Structure formats: structure tokens, C-alpha cells
Image (tube, grey):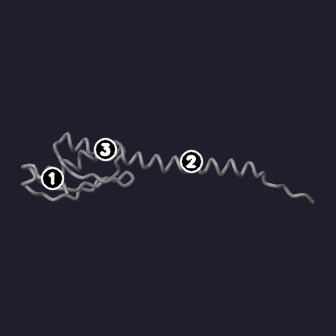
Amino acid sequence: MTTARFPIGLLWVVLLIALTTGGAVVWGLSHFEDDLGARSATELERAGLDLAVRVDGRDVSLSGSVASDGEAALAGHLVSAVRGVRRVTVDVTVDPAAAAGGSSG
């Protein structure tokens, strides 16, 4: 009775493909997050909003100070319109002094 042996060369090919694919996914996710953060920050800057942007996957969190509730809503709207963003969390402090040049936190 003979038994079929699994070709060791095929095992190496499968392992190489798996590692390459996994590495590409991890590398791509990091660059995707960087891109979402940069595009979100650009939209905020165009509107004159100075907020910190943090990205986790496709979710964006905003923090800092704004001059009004309207500015907080605008920030959330602008970032939610960025292609690729799934969810926006706006965790800002409303401080009327921020209109006079306050900075983000």
C-alpha cells in the first residue's frame, strides 16, 4: 500500500503567497489610515478648523477646541464626506475664545 505525499515545494509556495498577501494587507492598511488622516486634516484646514485627527481603520476621531457647536457639527460633516471614512467621532470643547486663535488639544 502506498500513500500519497504532499509535495514540500507546494507547501513552500502556499506559505510564500500567504506571507506576501498578509504583509501587503498590513502595509496597505497603515498607508490607508495615513491617507484618510491627511485628507481629513486638509478638509478641516480649508474650513479654518484646527483640530487633532486620529484614525483607527476607517474611523476618524476629532479633538481640540472650536468656537461654537456649529463649528463642531461642520467638522464632523466635512470629515464624514471624505471618501473612505466610515464613522466620525467629534470630541471637542466648545470655547468661544478658540475663534480668536485658540489651538487644538
C-alpha separation, residue under disc 2 versus residue under disc 3: 26 Å
**What percent of the width, then of the height, locates residue 45?**
20, 42
Of marks 1 and 2, which one's residue comes earlier in the chain?
Answer: 2
> Picture coordinates of residue 93 (x, y %)?
15, 59
- Whole-percent x, y for residue 84 in the image: 36, 45
Q: Is residue 31 left or right of residue 44?
A: right
Identity of the residue drawn at 10% across and 49% down? 101
Q: Quadrant of residue 44?
A: top left
Task: Verify CB contact (< 8 Å) between mark 1 and mark 3.
Answer: no
Residue 4 found in image quarter: bottom right
Q: Which residue is mark 3?
A: 38
Label located before the other in sequence (2 or 3): 2
> Residue 20 appears at what percent x and percent y?
58, 47
Front: mark 1 or 2: 1
Q: Residue at x 15, y 55 (%)?
A: 65
Q: CA distance from mark 1 to mark 3?
A: 18 Å
> What amino acid does circle 3 point to?
Ala
| Local secondary structure at mark 1 | loop
| Residue 46 in which image quadrant | top left
* 14 with respect to 36 (left or right): right
**Residue density around tag 1, few if under 14, some if 14–19, many if 20 or more, within 10 Å:** some
Residue occupied by mark 2: 21
Around disc 3, counting alpha carbons within 10 Å, would you say few (fewer than 14), some (14 to 19), or many (20 or more)? some
Depth order, front residue of 53/70? 53
Type of residue at label 1?
Ser
Q: Residue at x 32, y 47 (%)?
A: 37
Mark 1 highlights which residue? 103
